[in-house]
């Protein structure tokens, strides 16, 4: 058997495996009721159909977001995604990170990764979950986050004509599922919340009214979820309810995309590596 035939047979075999796997997955969902998975990424590889880099400057963050895992800020290995905030030995220019006011991020020695499922994986309501652990917790400036934004958000990348609504107005709403503020959260603290618009773009958002202060073993794997449950947003840790935003769910019935990022929100010196490791991300829909 010549090499060309062997290669063709190999390709056919791989295609058959993929087809059977997809067919099995679809069949598994037929007739199911309750929570049914309609998207999952288990990070066997970096899937560009699910995630893209997001470069911008917000919250007066000290680090520079970079593309394509530059400086080892992003790695997919052993079935998990690692996003890292890294301290360089020198300052680098950060002209690709621009604020909504057109300001360019100043030179910095800190670099990090930020991924979004914008225009790739977007869903209305349902339940989002990610299994996450941190390599460290409680240090000043730490700001890793797992969260959602409305699909019409006008921050980069802008790829559709209707992406013209400023944060956090309807269409560009925000839900934070797991956000760790190292300075205030200590070794175990994180927050979940929905952010209410205060009026216009210039007025910004209300971070505090719906904030739920929570605890977990941050340096161990945990499942962090938010669920649209009738009129409420329900925050869960390892599938157990730990917080609730009452009467908010219907205000956020808009397509939303996911974001995973590691930021630094302090000017204090940091050495070494801060890492957020993600085992998987999934979205589920409720089927009656």
Image: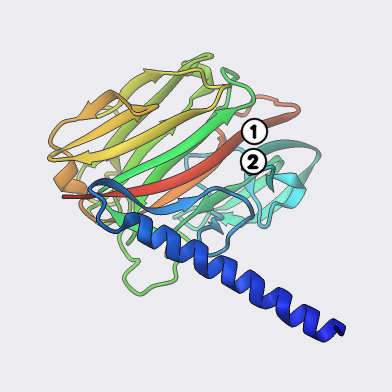
Task: Decide if residue 57 is in sight here.
Answer: yes
Residue at the outermost right position: 2
Based on the displayed image, in which of its 4 quarters is residue 232 positioned?
A: top left
Mark 2 and mark 1 in contact (Cβ < 8 Å)? yes
Q: Secondary structure at mark 1?
A: strand
Residue 169 is left or right of residue 139, and the answer is left
Disc 1 versus disc 2: distance between alpha carbons?
A: 7 Å
> Dot 2: within a 10 Å radius of its alpha carbon, few (fewer than 14), some, or many (20 or more) residues?
many
Based on the displayed image, in which of its 4 quarters is residue 203 positioned?
A: top left
* Marker disc for residue 266: none
> Dot 1: within a 10 Å radius of its alpha carbon, few (fewer than 14), some, or many (20 or more) residues?
many
The residue tagged 2 is 82
Q: What is the x, y in percent for residue 270?
A: 70, 26
Nearer-the-camera pick, 44 or 46 = 44
Q: Work out which quarter of the rendered image holds the N terminus and state it.
A: bottom right
Q: What is the x, y in percent for residue 47?
A: 58, 59
The residue tagged 1 is 275
Who comes first in sequence, dot 1 or dot 2?
A: 2
Give the residue at x 49% y 24%.
181
Task: Decide if residue 209 is in sight here.
Answer: no
From this view, report whether residue 30 is shown above or below residue 112: below
Nearer-the-camera pick, 166 or 67 = 67
Residue 128 is left or right of residue 273, and the answer is left
Residue 207 is left or right of residue 96, and the answer is left
Give the residue at x 58% y 21%.
219
Q: What is the x, y in percent for residue 214?
A: 37, 19
Q: What is the x, y in percent for residue 84?
A: 66, 39
């Amino acid at each position: 058997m010549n090499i060309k035939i062997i290669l063709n047979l190999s390709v056919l075999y791989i295609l058959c495996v993929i087809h059977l796997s997809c067919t099995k997955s679809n069949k598994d969902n037929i007739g199911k009721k309750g929570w049914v998975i309609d998207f999952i990424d288990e990070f066997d590889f970096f899937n560009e159909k699910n995630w893209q880099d997001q470069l911008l400057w917000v919250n007066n963050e000290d680090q520079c977001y970079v593309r394509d895992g530059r400086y080892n800020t992003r790695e997919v290995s052993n079935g998990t995604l690692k996003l890292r905030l890294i301290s360089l030995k020198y300052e680098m220019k950060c002209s690709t990170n621009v604020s909504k006011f057109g300001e360019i991020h100043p030179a910095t020695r800190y670099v990090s990764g930020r991924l979004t499922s914008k225009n790739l994986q977007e869903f209305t309501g349902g339940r989002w979950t990610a299994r996450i652990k941190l390599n460290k917790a409680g240090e000043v400036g730490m700001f890793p986050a797992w969260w959602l934004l409305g699909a019409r958000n006008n921050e980069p990348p802008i790829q559709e004509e209707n992406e013209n609504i400023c944060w956090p107005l309807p269409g560009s709403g925000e839900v934070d599922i797991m956000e760790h503020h190292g300075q205030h959260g200590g070794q175990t603290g994180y927050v979940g919340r929905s952010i209410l618009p205060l009026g216009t773009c210039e007025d910004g958002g209300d971070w505090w009214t719906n904030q739920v202060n929570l605890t977990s073993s941050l340096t161990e794997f945990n499942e962090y979820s938010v669920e649209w449950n009738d009129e409420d947003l329900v925050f869960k840790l390892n599938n157990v309810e730990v917080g609730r935003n009452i009467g908010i769910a219907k205000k956020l019935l808009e397509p939303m995309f996911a974001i995973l990022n590691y930021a630094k929100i302090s000017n204090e010196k940091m050495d070494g590596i801060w890492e957020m490791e993600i085992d998987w991300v999934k979205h589920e829909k409720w089927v009656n």
